[in-house]
Amino acid sequence: MFARIIILLILAVVSCHDPLFAAQKPDDHDALAGLKKASVIFDVRVPDHEKLVFNLKLINETFDGLVAQGVKPKMVVSFRGPGVKLLTAAEIDEDALELIRELKKKGVRIEVCSVALRVFKVEQAAIIPEVRLVANVFNSFIGYQNKGYALIAIN
């Protein structure tokens, strides 16, 4: 009888939906405490469509997460490396193009390195119009970091 009461008591406690037993909702409060705005430049060097789409989704989610937590994001997405071929009208994946357009609507600057275009033999005219051509993204990294932007490398 005593064991039966213990089992019933345990079941009652386990089935309780009290907020004390609810899972904690994750947030970035500690990292973002006191921030009103955050500036970041992403160094994107992805080699294929799948990684491009994955990371554009993650950048978009990061933007939305900052906004949801009361921080105004200023973002730059800089492309370099062999993945610059993915930003041509002939190669761009429809999902990637839609994500780039969505980020641009949010005010995110999207740029591609002309040095990378030269090295990987991509014609400037082939690059989609949503992406801004810059002379050298290393100069972008130098300039933006000296203006207080955090650098995040994405491979």
Image (cartoon, rainbow, N blue to C red):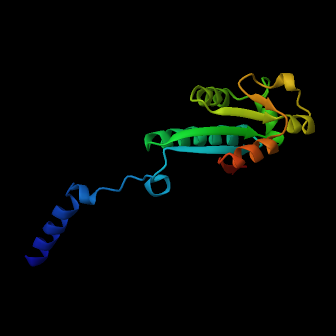
Depicted 108 relative to depicted 46: above or below: above
* Spot occupied by residue 112 in the image (x, y as percentages of width and height): 78, 34
* Residue 45 visible in image: no
* Spot occupied by residue 82 in the image (x, y as percentages of width and height): 83, 41
Depicted 145 relative to depicted 21: above or below: above
In depth, the one of 137 and 58 nearer the eye is 137
* Spot occupied by residue 55 in the image (x, y as percentages of width and height): 64, 42
Q: Residue at x 75, y 44 (%)?
A: 143
Q: Residue at x 77, y 43 (%)?
A: 47
Q: Residue at x 65, y 30 (%)?
A: 100
- Residue 88 falls in which quadrant of the image? top right
Q: Quick check: 19 left or right of 138?
A: left
- Residue 56 falls in which quadrant of the image? top right
Q: Quadrant of the N terminus?
A: bottom left
Q: Residue at x 22, y 62 (%)?
A: 14
Marks counted in the figure total 0
